[in-house]
Image: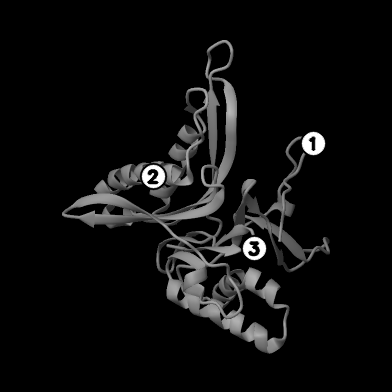
Amino acid sequence: MTLVAVWMAETRLMAIADSRIVRSAGNVLTEHGPKLLPITVICMQPSQNGAFDRVVYRSDIGFAYSGATLSALAAHALSTTLLSKLIGMPGAPPPALNELAHFVAGASAEYMREVGQLALKNGLFSALVFGWCPREQRLRIFELQPRITDGQLTVDNMERNLSPIKIGGIAKECAVTIGGGADDFAEEIDKELANAKNRGEVLEIVAFDAPKRALRRMIAEGSNQMIGGVIQQAWATSSGFQILSNLEPITPRPPSPRNVGSFILGFDTMDIQTVGSYQVGGLGR
């Protein structure tokens, strides 16, 4: 279990999740579990030699999940592998985001059925597919939820329309949340927004980050054993999906005086060795 939230802020969809993966309450498998992941979409059409090797569209969309890690990561791997190999005839438009979400829902159902043969309901997960829709030229978000009827498993694919988060808004109308502690999380967001006005803070900044502040407080207070680790974050804009590093204070480890870390998927990338002549970079907040 985990907690994932996506909300509309200005001209982007913001996403956060905790990084804890558990076998059961109190039985933590890792505090560095990847929950926010990109799915690469590549569309190719015939070139002059007739081969489908001319890239006409490329973008990344967001995938976030809560529930069975094996089923979710397998569905993500299959989706990003196959959706990066799409071929079509000249002039064909790229898939709309609802069509991409429909594909991911099908992949998710297949893995949940397979894993569920042994793990039963422990093989289920819910997910969010979100990002820029090239067909409608706007940001969209879809919630995938498993449903068992008469012993048959299907995955419902529902579009969620969000209001931009703002002071005085209602968290449940501004954010899509999946996972454990969703009601507590919504209350924490509402509390954060209400307190900001009383403290005289810059309201636009608080609204932009209120869900992140709420999740950070839930992790720090240990209010839910299924939620923990550190915050991971990402956003989706018209340019695509991007994982962000999360700047957090750390206790200095002598002889280094460094007191801040840049975390991606729960790992402090400042501790990671260089890769050849490069090092891990990227945007951070």
Q: From what the image shows, is residue 236 above or below residue 247?
A: above
The dot on residue 277 is 1
**What residue type is disc 2 on?**
His
Picture quarter with the N terminus: bottom left
Q: From what the image shows, is residue 171 above or below residue 97?
A: below
- CA gap, disc 1 to disc 2? 40 Å
- CA gap, disc 2 to disc 3? 27 Å
Disc 1 + disc 3, Cβ < 8 Å: no
Residue 31 is drawn in which quadrant?
A: bottom right
Mark yes or no: residue 268 visible: yes
- Coordinates of residue 105 in the picture (x, y in percent): 37, 46
The local crowd at label 1, few if under 14, some if 14 to 19, many if 20 or more residues have their Cα within 10 Å, is few
**Residue wearing tag 2:** 102
Secondary element at image label 3: loop
Residue furthest to the top in view is 49
Disc 2 + disc 3, Cβ < 8 Å: no
